[in-house]
């Protein structure tokens, strides 16, 4: 088991670029995860259909998130430990057991994902391979120090204790198989063709791809102009619109849930 951000990877619809983000909150479509070909997840864990785990396209691994099924309001907490799904139309793949608790079926399910910022930061900080400033290194062999005043002797250095060894392992929080009841919502779907810093660029993309320009708050205001298509009432309609967006050159298009 290891902490990993990872390099860019290519999915079915294009490239995904992993990066650390400890305050993730997003909506999109979830699917049920399938066993990876190797049987091992991207962070080195043995995959299990019974575990409360999931796969995300870009978030650092492991990370802990809450997932709310927007159709029935059910909420589960899972540990993200793998990469996927490989399509821009889906944002998360959830283990079969967690998906059953959420009441998911075979069809893609609209969900809201909220990261546990504090716990995810603790996981990152526990990475034993992360660069850390060390003032001094203890000797490999223990030595005995004797006080010149009272003759007190103390052994220092030597091999780390079991407690020290445990403290150097990556934090792997337990994920109990529990479900909470939250609020269900009526949702619609949009195709986000892109976010841009200038309105003129957004307008050119909108004209080329038959989209609409709106002003949003994504990316903390750095890319305030959004180009979208929709809304659509079904996933099938959104999937067709996403397929139509690619030939116009909008390679970063994705489905968002409203």
Image (cartoon, rainbow, N blue to C red):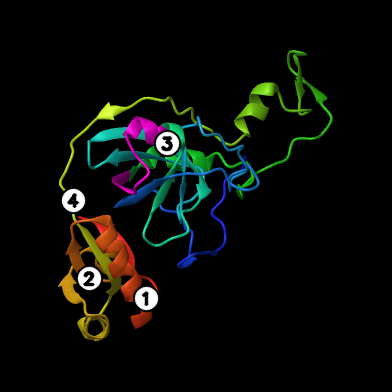
Where, by quadrant of the figure, is residue 249 drawn? bottom left
Q: Upstream in the sequence, badge 3 or badge 1?
A: 3
Q: Position of residue 148 (x, y in %)?
A: 77, 20
Query: Label for residue 181?
Result: none
* Residue at 24%, 67% in the rendered image: 221
Q: Is residue 37 left or right of residue 52?
A: right
Give the CA separation, mark 3 to mark 2: 31 Å
Badge nearest the viewer, 3 or 1? 1
Mark 1 — residue?
Answer: 246
Query: Label for residue 78?
Result: 3
Q: Pointer 2 and pointer 4: residues touching (CB < 8 Å)?
A: no
Q: Is residue 7 left or right of residue 122?
A: right
Give the CA separation, mark 3 to mark 1: 32 Å
Q: Is residue 166 left or right of residue 62?
A: right
Magenta span includes 57: no
Mark 2 — residue?
Answer: 228
Give the CA separation, mark 2 to mark 1: 13 Å
Give the CA separation, mark 2 to mark 4: 16 Å
Q: Pointer 3 and pointer 2: residues touching (CB < 8 Å)?
A: no
Neighbour class for label 4 at 10 Å: few (<14), some, many (≥20)?
some
For the C terminus, which image quadrant?
bottom left
Mark 4 — residue?
Answer: 187
Q: Position of residue 115 (x, y in %)?
A: 36, 43
Magenta-drawn segment:
98-113
Residue 23 visible: no
Q: Upstream in the sequence, badge 3 or badge 4?
A: 3
Give the CA separation, mark 1 to mark 4: 24 Å
Whether 144 is drawn above or below 114: the answer is above
């Amino acid at each position: 088991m290891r902490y990993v951000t990872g390099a860019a990877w290519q999915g079915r619809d294009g490239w995904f670029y992993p990066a650390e983000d400890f305050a993730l909150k997003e909506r999109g479509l979830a699917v049920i995860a399938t066993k990876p070909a190797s049987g091992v997840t991207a962070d080195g864990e043995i995959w299990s259909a019974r575990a409360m785990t999931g796969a995300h396209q870009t978030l650092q691994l492991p990370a802990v998130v809450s997932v709310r099924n927007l159709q029935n309001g059910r909420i589960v907490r899972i540990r993200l430990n793998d990469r996927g799904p490989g399509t821009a139309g889906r944002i998360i793949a959830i283990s079969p057991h967690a998906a059953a608790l959420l009441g998911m079926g075979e069809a893609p399910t609209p969900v809201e994902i909220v990261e546990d910022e504090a716990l995810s930061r603790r996981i990152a900080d526990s990475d034993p391979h992360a660069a850390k400033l060390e003032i001094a290194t203890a000797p490999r062999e223990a030595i005995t120090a004797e006080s010149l005043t009272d003759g007190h002797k103390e052994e220092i250095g030597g091999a780390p204790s079991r407690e020290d060894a445990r403290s150097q392992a990556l934090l792997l929080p337990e994920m109990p198989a529990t479900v909470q009841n939250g609020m269900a919502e009526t949702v619609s779907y949009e195709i986000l063709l892109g976010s841009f810093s200038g309105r003129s660029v957004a307008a050119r993309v909108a004209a080329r791809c038959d989209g609409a320009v709106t002003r949003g708050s994504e990316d903390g205001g750095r890319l305030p102009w959004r180009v979208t298509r929709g809304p659509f009432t079904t996933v099938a309609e959104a999937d067709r619109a996403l397929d139509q967006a690619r030939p116009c050159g909008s390679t970063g298009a994705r489905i968002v849930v409203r």
